[in-house]
Image (cartoon, helix red, strand yellow):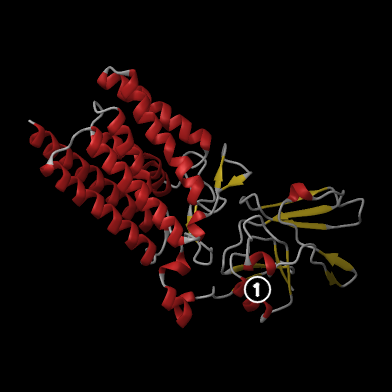
Amino acid sequence: MIAHAGDVGSPELLIQLGALARVVAGRGNSDRGASAEAVPVGDVAEVGAASLSPLHDRGELDLDPASAGSGTVISGHSHRPTMERKGPVHECRQRRAEPHFAAHVGGNAHRAPHPDRRGDPAARRVGWIAKGDPILAGHYSAAFLAKAAEPRVPLWVLVLAAQAIDAVGAVLLLLGVEHPRIEPGLPANPLDIYNTPYTHSLVGTLVWSTLAFVIVRQWLGSRRAGLATGAVVLSHWWLDLLVHQPDLTLWGAPPELGLSLGSHPAASLAVELALLVGSALLYVRVQSVRSAGRRALAVLVGALAVVQLATAIVSPPLGPDRVALCALSIFFATTWGAYRVERIVDAASA
């Protein structure tokens, strides 16, 4: 028998596991739509003389396992795998269930191939729609809006601020401090930021935002410039909240938050490109950017739109480390591009 403690990610996974053994599963907070329909609430299986009912969130257990005669509690949700004994009860917390992982009740682990949607002709026809849309271009809208409001801050600084959270997150990933991972079975962006408390929690983002405020205020001698830059850094978490599946946190621990707009890639892409283009046009209008500067800015905005489309169409490189390196390369190129654009804008205005 296979026990799955929730966050199934894809109904096909339960079908594949069912070919190996009987599956009993608990519905997780990330199971929505077809995934939720495939996982009944309160699924119970008889194992010899005992009953087994996997529970996603240990905090929802409304009885004392020992008093109820239960010898084992299997749960998930916390993303922190543990195995401990509390009196006569063994408590096992699985990490977030991956598309290729299931825990066997007998204590062994079985690895089954995850559903490969690229081998499905229907999935090939819809292409990027089956994958999901990670937010990228939309973050830069905050930089253009801040530049329109506070022209003293260099554009490259604001572009760097817009991507600072992901840039720091990529570095912390490479250093082994934070631990996102690739989960191809997730309904939206397959990058699962299941343990990134220093960058993708609201408290962590506030810390980086405050640091940006202090640095820019000291550098330019302007509180307004510091506030504009700090606001751009802070906007990252709120824009992620709009697009991400529930994987953001307030302080690095549950509850997990996310409105999952990325699960509807066409709508997500339209919103992001509208934010990007609209904010760039506002910057051009407010700052009276001349024709040479407009052309340079159009090239930068066009490049960001192409990168956004590419990330939605092309599967990411295998492994979070390679994703981090690719992201850092994009961030460096974008910051350099913003620097070049502003030089052209300044020269055209001279």
Q: Nearer the viewer, residue 226 or 59?
A: 226
Give SS at disc 1.
helix
Residue sitting at x 41%, y 30%? 209
Quadrant where the image shows the C terminus: top left
Q: Residue 290 location, x and y as percent?
A: 13, 39
Identity of the residue drawn at 30% across and 35% down: 158
Task: Give x and y (percent) for residue 16.
Answer: 62, 78
| Residue 218 falls in image quadrant | top left
Residue at x 74% of width, y 50% of height:
58
Residue 234 horizontal side relative to residue 256, left or right: left
Q: Residue at x 28, y 33 (%)?
A: 147
Q: Nearer the viewer, residue 134 or 321?
A: 134
In the rendered image, residue 326, in percent from the top left (x then y), is placed at: 32, 55
Q: Quadrant of the N terminus?
A: bottom right
Q: Is residue 223 visible?
A: yes
**Label 1 sits on residue:** 14
Q: Nearer the viewer, residue 55 or 125?
A: 125
Is residue 163 at all visible to an observer of this figure?
no
- Whether residue 33 is situated above or below residue 88 in the rendered picture: below
User: Image height check: is 214 above or below 191?
Assistant: above
Number of numbered tags placed on the structure image: 1
Mark 1: amino acid = Leu
In the figure, is residue 319 to the left or right of 59?
Answer: left
Label 1 Cα neighbours within 10 Å, binned few <14 / some 14-19 / many ≥20:
many
* Picture quadrant of residue 232: top left
Residue 334 vertical position relative to residue 34 in the rendered view, above or below: above
Left or right, 161 with reference to 262 = left
On screen, residue 109 versus residue 44, left or right, reads left
Q: Position of residue 308 (x, y in %)?
A: 34, 57
